[in-house]
Image (tube, rainbow, N blue to C red):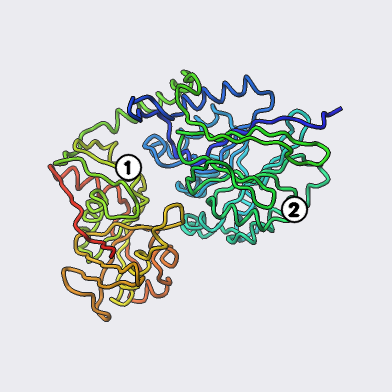
Amino acid sequence: MTERFKKFTILHSNDIHGDFLAEAKGAEGHLIGGLSLLSGYLNKVRSEEKNTLFVISGDMLQGSIIDSEYKGISTIEVMNYLAPDVVTLGNHELDYGFPHLLVLEKLANFPIVNANLYIKKYNKRLMNPYVILNVDGFDIMFIGIITQEALKSLKLDTSIGTFVSLEDAATEVGKICNAYKNEDIDLTVLLTHIGFEEDKKLAAMLDPEWGVDMIIGGHSHTILEQPAQINDILIAQAGVGTDQIGRFDITVDDDTNSIVEWKWQLLTVDSKLAEPDTKIEELIATFKDAVDRKYNRLVSRLTRQLTHPRRDQETELGNLIADIFGQIDTCDVAIVGSGSIRGTQLGPVVTLGNLKEVFPYDSPLYKVKVTGTHLTKIFTHIMRPENRMPGKSSTCFQVNKNIQAIYNESEQRLESLSVHEKPVQKDHQYTICLQEYYCKNSERTLGVMPEEFTKLGAPKVITTSAQDVIEEFFTSNQLINSHIEGRLIYK
């Protein structure tokens, strides 16, 4: 006979982004993060607590040179070692393409759940929408959800669609919960990758009769003091990378299928938390050694270290990369997504590996011709205050040296915009160099409709590899420097 009350420990990570290795941080320089220490803690808790579950809320992939070199296969192999009980998709799981995602899913020894990604033509779900795990006699259902944020990546593959709104996602959750009430589910957990603010909105939309108990999320990289609690649903996530891990200790009532006691902690992953797992270090070393041999080649020197401390402001490194792109095909304007620059610093010695880590996204670059009216509209959109709020779904940019834009924050308007030191003329034509992602998602990221964006002609591919352009520039130039020059000014 099943006990009425049962205790469970749910450990959760999100947005690991290929963060395999520990780093020395803090005044004492002690090691924090890395999968060796994370695995050590998982081993410790699994040995101490009878009913332990480990879940990951999306974005296992992308962000490290090891992940990029092996196109996620290395990450899946390492995740197989960690043995999560269930994982949901994040937007970066699709970075290597839809067909490759299906290969990665086949390699995974753990279930990957997502309820609302569909192959449009056949109205078939891309993944299993849920999994029910029986743990010590209790049935726990995990449902995966991703919404409009993921669609940014998916627009590069027209064969896949999604229920993009929170309302539709909530309806999908209801369908699944209603269909499996007869299974006597003791605990229902949504694994989401939509951001903390969206998680709270989603929780408010869910019918209490559906029995959702928890939302464990990702995407916004939110660090919490304690979970939110909305509509009697606990909502948590665990920052970004492997520097921390979330831990729920809960007691579930079998009669009411509800959580009656809970405690949550966000724990720093360091040597105080657990002993490192040397076996996973050996596995990671097999990938790292091969990557190091290929990528430790010196390609250039900078005159000094260049930094990229924040996405929402002009940076030295951002200016340099925008200038490199701006030289291709003599474009008037080059805009580079700040978020695609993954490192916070580069140099003064630069290896090929350093370049790949700082700019891991190897997509085509496009040239688009627009009028001065549309160029002004773009800068008004990307410089507006709500696009630069921490924790929000913002898309910030770095621009090349031909540009100076002045935005009046108190009046929320673009005061001036000049190209080549001349004010932008409404009817004049300008060429923009930009990454494929922003070219194909112009409405959301740049504030211009696709038909406006292509009014003067279809976008033209000027290189199939942004990484090749960067590597060639660094190989051909030495003692490179870059400064913050006031290209984007906020008054």
Name the residue: 62% across, 55% down.
Answer: 202
Give SS at disc 1: loop
Q: Left or right: where does residue 431 sit relative to residue 422?
A: right
The image position of residue 325, as x and y in percent, is 25, 56
Badge 1, how many Cα within 10 Å: few under 14, some, many 20+? Answer: many
Q: Name the residue under label 1.
A: 343
| Residue at figure coordinates x 37%, y 28% from the top left | 288
Q: Vertical placement of 467 versus 261: above or below?
A: below
Residue 385 in sight: yes
Res. 120 image quadrant: bottom right
Tell me the quarter of the image containing the N terminus: top right
Q: Residue furthest bottom?
A: 427
Give the number of marks: 2
> Looking at the figure, which quarter contains the C terminus?
bottom left
Give the x, y percent position of residue 156: 46, 57
Q: Which of the two discs, 2 and 1, sits closer to the camera?
A: 2
In-image side of 91 versus 454 (left or right) = right
Q: Which of 99 and 152 is in front in this view?
A: 152
| C-alpha distance separating marks 2 and 1 | 43 Å
Q: Does 459 appear above or below 39?
A: below
Badge 2: residue crowd in 10 Å (few <14, some 14–19, many ≥20): some
Tell me which amino acid carries mark 2: Pro
Residue position for label 2? 208
